[in-house]
């Protein structure tokens, strides 16, 4: 049995930078299923800024653990998200996060070839 705490700031690596910057977010891989389907669970934390992700060949579901952001899927009107929000991003959908305060989320990513 493995137990993780999303508040632990260990084993993070640089992740996607915020628009116009060289940094801004970090990710910590918690679990990866290499054999079955490539599912990953990770913690992502980000400083305020704009994070733009193109459409990807995967499904992602995340829970906001801390912070506030505006979330837009495929260019839709931004929706406020904050602690406790659950967001599902289907395969082929682009996402933009405008992080308003330091944000931390737990995400499950499932590849969909």
Image (cartoon, rainbow, N blue to C red):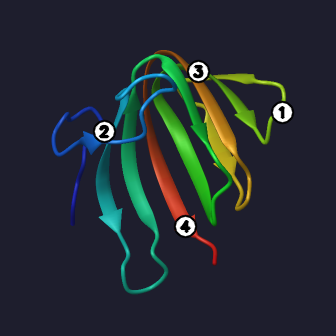
- Quadrant holding the N terminus: bottom left
Disc marking residue 76: 1
> Residue tagged by mark 3?
69
Residue depicted at 67% across the width and 48% down the height: 88
Q: First in sequence, mark 3 or 2: give its number.
A: 2
CA distance separating discs 3 and 2: 18 Å
Give the crowd class for mark 4: few <14, some 14-19, many >=20 residues within 10 Å.
some
Q: First in sequence, mark 4 or 1: give its number.
A: 1
Front disc: 1 or 2: 1
| 12 and 3: which is toward the camera | 12
Residue depicted at 45% across the width and 37% down the height: 105
The reply, left or right, for residue 99 in relation to residue 13 is right
Quarter where residue 69 is shown = top right
Q: First in sequence, mark 2 or 4: give its number.
A: 2
The reply, left or right, for residue 54 in relation to residue 28 is right
> Residue tagged by mark 2?
6
> Residue tagged by mark 4?
110
SS at mark 1 in the image: loop
Residue 70 percent across, percent down from the top left: 66, 22
Front disc: 1 or 3: 1
Residue 83 vertical placement versus 31 (above, below): above
Front disc: 2 or 4: 4
């Amino acid at each position: 049995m493995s137990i993780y705490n999303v508040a632990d700031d260990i084993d993070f690596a640089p992740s996607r930078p915020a628009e116009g910057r060289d940094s801004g977010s970090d990710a910590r891989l918690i679990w990866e299923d290499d054999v079955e389907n490539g599912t990953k669970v990770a913690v992502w934390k980000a400083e305020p800024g704009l994070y733009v992700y193109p459409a990807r060949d995967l499904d992602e579901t995340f829970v906001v653990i801390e912070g506030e952001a505006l979330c837009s899927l495929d260019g839709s009107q931004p929706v406020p998200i904050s602690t406790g929000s659950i967001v599902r991003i289907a395969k082929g959908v682009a996402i933009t996060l405008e992080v308003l305060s330091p944000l931390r989320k737990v995400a499950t990513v499932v590849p969909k070839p």
